[in-house]
Image (cartoon, rainbow, N blue to C red):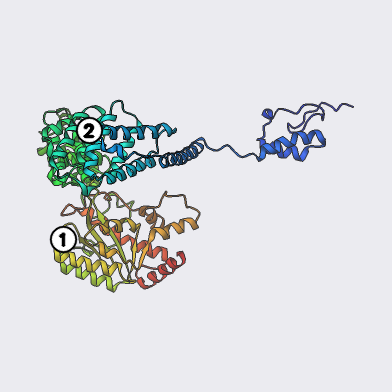
Amino acid sequence: SPRPSTPRPPWRPRRADSPPRSLARSPLPPREHGRRLGREGRGDAMDELVGPLRAYGRRREPVCKVAVTGRRRRQEARESKIEAAGVAQDMVLDVAALLQARSGIAALVGLAENAMLRLKSTGAHIGPVAHRIAELVGGAAHKVGWTVHELFAKLLVPTLAAMRSPKSRAFGVVLAAGKVLWATENWPDLDQQRAEGVAEVVTAHFFSGPDLTTGAWLVAHLRLEAYFVLEDLFTALRQNMQAFRIYCANAPAQMQRRMLHRLLECTDGLERSQRREILSIGADLITLCKLDREEFPMVARYKAINWMCYMVHKVPWWVAEDYAHGDTELLALCVDQLASVGRLEDSILLFRRHEQELVGRLPPAVLLRLQAAATPCESAAASTADRFAPRDPEASVALALPEGSVIWADTEELIQEAVSAVRASPVVGVDLEWSALGDWLDCSLALLQVAVCDRVFLVDLAAPSPAVRDAVDALLRAILATPRPLVLCFAFRNDLRELARSPWAACCKELRGLCDLQMLGDEERAASGDADGFVGRGLAALVARTLGRPLCKAEQRSCWHRRPLRAAQLHYAALDAFVLLQVGAAIAGRPMAEAEAVAAALELRLAAAR
């Protein structure tokens, strides 16, 4: 008898002989749909329905299209290399043909063209073919008694000239083979007549159009500069800045400097955008060629202005003032930039401090706007006043020592006093400061902070004398090369990186007794279930968790090479080292006065962590 037509769940069929409901109409996901059908299904008809659904539920999810594409490309690259290697093994070259100029060129062109015809892939992996051609050509030249200079002059350079029109993939293969055969010690060619002939071929065939990059490579690597007039060579390479870069990157140091000076002379009378483009290229080439940056003050000035345009938006105005200290043009730039982004109060405060110097430097519209604006309120001026305290003393941790306990150590005697204090203390806090001077000026260490329980030593590293350098070396060895005192630090790998670039690099080769509080802080966060990646891993967050108040980082990116340092900088530097002792004591669960107990407890924590 027919069953009553009562509502049923979507996963149960109405009748055994009725067609199943559409899977698309089910509110359940396919995997769950199949499971429920398996539990509820009865009879052969249900088995027919459940089987495909179970198979559907077991089917793997489709792989990401990007991953599939990456695997396919890697597979194609492997197949292309195998194919190129197979083609290269079958290549042969008639040695006798090399004795004739035209037949040798034709033989080499035919060899490369046939290899490219057999190589059905896109030619992304022509390395095996190029190395095989270099092997065949080099072996044939050796058999006929050619030197490498004769090989380039009689065969390789003329072959490239013959293949340039119409150019094909085989041109790149022959050029790559020439690069394999080239070696620095073989050049320049001492036969001036032969070298001059090569220079004439390069000038005739490779100093125009897209072939200029090949010409630049040949002139630089074959050392053909002596056969060109500097102005003619510069004019030709100036047409293509990529060719100019290729030549400068591989030319002798003297030619690098001459070409770069000639390039910078072209900035006179250009528009601002064109001038900036040339200066940017010059800066890249100076870095690439490792030239003396002091030899190019125009580029150094451009990089300083460019870096200040970026930095003024990342730091408080008083930090920007430190970096522009004594430079009226940079001060005017800071005031203009602050006003242009709506930081009018900061712009007014900076302008009022240097009003007499900046009146003739600022754009008229900005000057009128600043002069018409009201003077900032007293609270704003007071909040930016320089004092030995954090910027917000009520909401931030302050140094728990009087100002007289912070010792500025810039003499051999004071540094030796710091060494004695370190050796007498079971635990010390250590930090280093350096200035972020952009990608043009190499940053160098400016300050070493060493904190013991009752004093903080600020050791001046900016411009040490030989005696001070030796005293700093002894201090660093007393800190880093002995198991006691226990050295409390935070993310010290960054400090060690800068220390390794300094005159005291030898001091960081053997490290003992380091306790990185970042690692212990991460363990505490993981134990409390608050390990959320890199969020809150900084020292300020660790201080807030352990001491209950955050650490003010307003002076973090200060100009630490300025002398004398401001009072707020001195406070920040001293606190950055002393707060490590406070945090270490809080993690150890001991009073800071019990230095031996704090050190023992932290050493146990470190042993357990390892």
> Where's residue 242, x and y in %?
25, 34
- The residue at 42%/48% (across/down) is 535
Q: Is residue 583 left or right of residue 25?
A: left
With respect to residue 556, does 313 lie above or below?
A: above
Among the 4 quarters of the image, the one containing residue 485: bottom left
How many numbered markers are drawn?
Answer: 2
Name the residue at the right extreme. 1
**Residue behind mark 1:** 464
Kindly state the secondary structure of the residue where label 1 is placed: loop
> Where's residue 132, x and y in %?
36, 42
| Quadrant of the frame with the N terminus | top right
- The residue at 29%/63% (across/down) is 508
Q: Earlier in the sequence, mark 1 or mark 2?
A: 2
Kindly state the secondary structure of the residue where label 2 is placed: helix
Can residue 182 be seen here?
yes
Among the 4 quarters of the image, the one containing residue 341: top left
> Where's residue 414, x and y in %?
18, 67
Label 1 Cα crowd, 10 Å radius (few <14 / some 14-19 / many 20+): some
What label does residue 241 carry, if any? 2
With respect to residue 2, does 126 lie above or below?
A: below
Tell me which amino acid carries mark 2.
Met
- Asked whether 192 or 459 is in front, the reply is 192
Can residue 376 be seen here?
no
> Where's residue 71, x and y in %?
49, 40
